Image: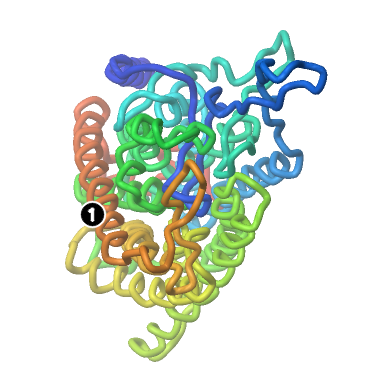
């Protein structure tokens, strides 16, 4: 534990050189883009009309500050609960059912404790690094220990921007919502090296990777100054210059195709290479011990994902509804796409295939959820089912890594596919809502001016940067953990199973 705390302290010191400011919003572009929040910019305060009794020369008084809508606030709290549901128990059961019975509890522990660790780190410093003004790569420390999100003496709460001018939600609610994103992203990585990693090594790696990969990528993709900061053409360049690098490029990521899925998948793949293959891999059958639990887990993921995607609209509005229906449609289409591919290749459709197809569809629609039309969502879903099936079969053989639960094949391949197709189906010419081209007037790019090629290139740049960043950070973090703790359990412990050797428990009693 002392080593873990020392590593975190070093991480904070390293990032402390970046400037500080107050917490701001995220976005990928348009009110159809990513998740975001910020304190309502003071520059957005409008001047009110002169009082009737004053002379014509009287000065205008500032308008009242925006007040959060109770419906928006309620929806965001419900969405936060849904994301917790999709992690614990959703992801935990999905992963747990896929491993051998002797490692069931170890996977449940790794998911639950990783999620808990990251939530704590998020409120200590992660939120500040991701969602306050700093530079194009990382935020500052103005929200360290959540300083300033509320005044306990006055009983007032800081507000955060949404994607609509003059509309805010309590910043404390946004911070909690985004904490669940950070937690599930790190928990996803567990599946790549399941059944062979030391529990302490997993936790130390997660702390390092969260600090140096998740927080910077979240800042680069989602941090911007909020719509109310764009008060006129004269401030546009200055406001854009304060946003995260990938947001400045104009990349669209509604709910985390890059930040969550590609980021985690690359970290998992690097871990699978560095930790090595399970004993007996390629020689013994590694049969899932409970596809029943895997199906239950995938169903909980599907339900929870509505909060993940639709909540990223930050308001209970039409774009939340669009993200909701697209999450519904794409996932169902992906289930059909996957089992169709299985039937054509193997002659049979499997329960594991249906569950995996659902997750593939959820992954692929994540960056596109509020950024595409319903037709685009259906196409993305079908393609995700088919292409992710190849990802866990053909691509997995090419890569040669023992990615235990196919984290890269589903989350990496699905995340890349969804991120690229977002640039295609966001086009208003293909039924998409387009993206905001002018935040001063909040007007979207017209069908005549929308370029699919240009947007896909921007999307590809965001994908490429995420892959490289996560890979480099992961490689260094795994190496540090290996030197300090060691990554892998001894052979005899792996053979006996991690439930008993790491936790002194068994999932099932005979």
Q: Residue furthest right?
A: 53
Quarter of the image with the C terminus in it:
bottom right
Of the pair 280 and 59, the residue shown nearer to us: 59
Q: Which residue is farthest top? A: 153
Residue carrying label 1: 277
Q: Image quadrant of residue 295?
A: bottom right
Q: Position of residue 448 (x, y in %)?
A: 38, 68
Question: Residue at the spot x=45%, y=43% of the render?
Answer: 27
Q: Secondary structure at mark 1?
A: loop
The quarter holding residue 81 reads top right
Mark 1 Cα within 10 Å, few/some/many (few <14, many 20+)? Answer: some
Residue 341 versus residue 118 in the image, above or below: below
Q: Is residue 170 left or right of residue 42?
A: right
Residue 99 locus on image (x, y percent):
43, 58
Residue 286 in sight here:
yes
Q: Is residue 268 left or right of residue 150?
A: left
Q: How is the image coloured?
A: rainbow
Residue 404 appears in the picture as rendered: no
* Rendered location of residue 10, percent (x, y): 29, 17
Image coordinates of residue 64 in percent, x first then y, are 71, 25
In the image, what residue occupies the spot 35% across and 30% down? Answer: 238
Towards the viewer: 166 or 93: 166
Q: In this rendering, is residue 73 above or below 308?
A: above
Quadrant placement of the N terminus: top left
Which residue is pictured at 23% across the width and 69% down the height?
A: 395
Question: Image point 55% across, 51% down: which residue?
Answer: 308
**Residue that extends furthest to the front in the rendered view of this protein:** 56
| Residue 431 position (above or below residue 116) | below
In the rendered image of this protein, does residue 101 appear above or below residue 11?
below
Q: How many dots with numbers?
A: 1
């Amino acid at each position: 534990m002392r080593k873990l705390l020392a590593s975190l302290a070093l991480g904070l010191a390293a990032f402390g050189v970046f400037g500080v400011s107050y917490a701001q919003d995220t976005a990928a572009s348009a009110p159809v883009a990513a998740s975001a929040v910020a304190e309502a910019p003071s520059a957005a305060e409008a001047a009110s009309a002169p009082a009737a009794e004053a002379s014509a020369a009287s000065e205008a008084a500032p308008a009242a500050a925006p007040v959060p809508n109770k419906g928006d606030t309620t929806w965001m709290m419900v969405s936060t609960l849904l994301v917790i549901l999709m992690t614990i128990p959703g992801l935990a059961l999905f992963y747990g059912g896929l491993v051998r019975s002797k490692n069931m509890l170890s996977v449940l522990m790794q998911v639950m404790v990783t999620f808990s660790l990251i939530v704590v780190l998020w409120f200590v410093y992660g939120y500040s690094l991701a969602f306050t003004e700093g530079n194009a790569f990382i935020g500052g420390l103005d929200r360290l220990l959540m300083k300033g999100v509320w005044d306990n003496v006055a009983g007032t709460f800081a507000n955060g921007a949404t994607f609509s001018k003059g509309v805010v939600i309590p910043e404390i609610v946004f911070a909690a919502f985004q904490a669940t994103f950070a937690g599930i992203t790190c928990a996803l990585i567990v599946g790549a090296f399941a059944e062979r990693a030391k529990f302490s090594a997993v936790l130390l790696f997660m702390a390092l990777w969260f600090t140096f990969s998740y927080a910077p990528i979240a800042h680069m993709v989602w941090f911007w100054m909020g719509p109310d900061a764009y008060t006129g053409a004269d401030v546009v360049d200055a406001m854009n210059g304060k946003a995260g690098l990938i947001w400045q490029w104009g990349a669209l990521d509604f709910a985390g195709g890059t930040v969550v899925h590609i980021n985690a998948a690359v970290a998992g793949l690097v871990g699978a290479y560095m930790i090595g293959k399970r004993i007996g891999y390629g020689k013994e059958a590694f049969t899932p011990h409970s596809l029943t639990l895997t199906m239950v887990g995938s169903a909980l993921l599907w339900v929870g994902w509505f909060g993940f995607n639709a909540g990223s609209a930050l308001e209970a509005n039409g774009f939340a509804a669009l993200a909701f229906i697209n999450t519904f449609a794409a996932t169902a289409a992906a289930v059909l796409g996957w089992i169709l591919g299985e039937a054509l290749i193997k002659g049979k459709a499997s329960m594991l295939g249906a569950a995996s197809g659902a997750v593939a569809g959820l992954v692929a629609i994540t960056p596109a959820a509020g950024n595409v039309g319903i037709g685009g969502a259906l196409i993305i879903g079908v393609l995700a089912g088919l292409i992710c099936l190849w990802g866990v079969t053909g691509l997995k053989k090419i890569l040669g890594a023992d990615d235990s639960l196919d984290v890269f094949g589903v989350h990496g391949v699905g995340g890349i596919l969804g991120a690229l197709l977002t640039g295609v189906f966001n086009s208003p010419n293909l039924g998409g809502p387009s993206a905001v081209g002018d935040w001063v007037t909040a007007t979207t790019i017209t069908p005549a001016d929308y370029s699919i090629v240009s947007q896909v290139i921007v999307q590809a740049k965001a994908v490429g940067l995420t892959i490289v960043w996560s890979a480099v950070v992961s490689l260094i973090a795994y190496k540090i953990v290996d030197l300090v703790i060691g990554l892998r359990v001894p052979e005899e412990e792996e053979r006996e199973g991690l439930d008993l050797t790491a936790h002194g428990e068994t999932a099932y009693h005979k």
